[in-house]
Image (cartoon, grey):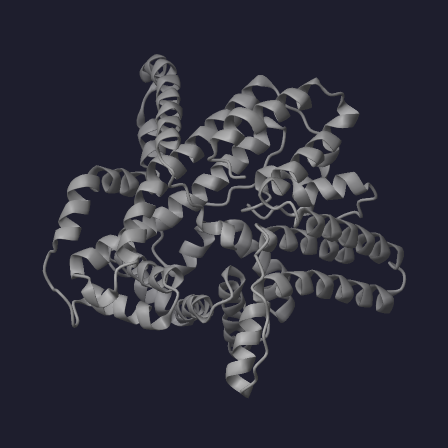
Amino acid sequence: MVFSNLVFIFAFLPVVLFVYFLANKASKNIILLIASLIFYAWGEPTYVFLMIFSMVMNYSFGLLIDRLSDKPRQKKYALAFAIIGNLAILGFFKYAGFIVTNLNRLLGLTLEIEPIALPIGISFFTFQAMSYVIDVYRKDAAVQKSFVSLSLYIALFPQLVAGPIVRYNTVADQIKKRFVNLDKFTDGVKRFIIGLAKKVLLANSFGEIADAIFSTPATELSVASAWLGILAYTLQIYFDFSGYSDMAIGLGKMFGFDFLENFNYPYIAKSVTEFWRRWHISLGAWFRDYVYIPLGGNRQGSAKTIRNLLIVWTITGFWHGASWTFIAWGFYYGLFIVMERLGFSKLLSKLWTPLQHVYLLLVVMIGWVFFRADQFSYSFQFLQAMAGIGGNAGLDTTAIIYWNDFWYVFLLGMIFSTPVAIWVKSRLGEQWQPVLSVVTPVVYLMLMVSSMLLLVNSTYNPFIYFRF
């Protein structure tokens, strides 16, 4: 089940909210846990047992690590087994086919493996579970002795399938005790509507264009079509993922949870380093705290810092998908971040500010080509089309039609990928507050109604990050 689904909006969510607020305080976590398992089982009835196994495993390892607190060696072994267990689950379901295929190519083997359906959100809930046992090991978090509470942390449906990746110590107190008042609930509804509008009104529109252009042989694309396609995908993936994060944060508020922000207008960044401080913030923080710093971070000299950065970013790419194009995408960003760390950022900072933005957007859009394409051959052909090499250097009918039909969607996408609304609101004085108090509810209502109309009349409603 996805948030941008009529069944979720008009059936699942109202029922869960009704039962949740009728229940007494002692039952609320149990109700949320049951609802979360039903939410996951809706589309993954078999894999809900995999999630339950993950809950049991990590709950047990957390207790064991805490019990061995005065036995450092055994405690370290317990942590190692916990990490291996989580990575084994993730590796089998997400990477087994990739590993077998590459072993066959490398060693000339003929190993066979049946295609394995990827459990939705496995990368997200596995990383959350690992962060819990690691934090218990480090004594950054107290062990959770309630199985229901830990299970709710792992399975909580607002952030279950696509994040943000919630650290246990940021919500441990909220799992135990939280409150919801009318203002907080209203803020949650508003945030959910904003996320839904991003997803349905913008991301889905861009997705149709990107899918059509990327399904065309790259050698047949004109320069205009190639650039229009990657611009559409650049906006689609932002509004798709940030919209889902907005909906997750909004849903969390409705139930009394405060999740950390996951996006902060990444396309206004002026460097790759800044971009990754603004994009998928929870994932970047996870890799920083659990991979980069344990490797030594930047504390062991320039050579090892470069090594650590390249390792982390290569793993980041691999986290996104079992494909060499994802690995290359991660390594590609690692190279730019290393280059900026070695001094390019100082040179970059001296450039005219618009040129810094152009640099960042070019790097990101080229990176999205590898992220979107399934094969290196298509990626390089698409980049050639963008550069006007070996293809049609002029306008073509496809580009003209898409631009004529969707120019206003592109304009809205480019505007709202920046904090322009926040800027405008901050510039309005007190005299505008009465007007805003009337206009704002109307705007939210229009966004909700428009989103509903599109959901009713369209069958196109993909979600990019489900495959991660």
**Left or right relative to 359: residue 299:** right
Residue 34 in the image, given as x and y percentages of width and height: 71, 34
Q: Is residue 264 visible?
A: no
Horizontal and vertical percent position of residue 461: 41, 41
Image quadrant in which you'd find residue 225 = bottom left
Of 137 and 372, which appears nearest the observer? 372
426 vs 8, nearest the viewer: 8
Which residue is nearer to you in this view: 419 or 415? 415
Say if residue 79 shows up in the picture.
Answer: yes
Most distant residue in the bottom direction: 108
Q: Is residue 163 left or right of residue 366?
A: right
In the figure, residue 28 lies in which quadrant?
Answer: top right
Residue 359 point in image, percent of width and height: 28, 60
Instruction: Give the answer, above or below, for where 297 lies relative to 249.
Output: below
Instruction: Tell me the residue at 33%/32% (across/down).
Output: 421
Q: Is residue 147 above or below residue 25?
A: below
- Residue lying at 26% horizontally and 55% vertically, measured from the top left: 213
Q: Position of residue 217 (x, y in %)?
A: 25, 64
Answer with left or right where residue 439 lies relative to residue 50: left
Q: What's the residue at 46%, 35% (across, down)?
A: 4
Q: Residue furthest left?
A: 394
Relative to 29, say whether 371 is above or below: below
The residue drawn where x is 53% and y is 70% is 98
425 lies left or right of 384: right
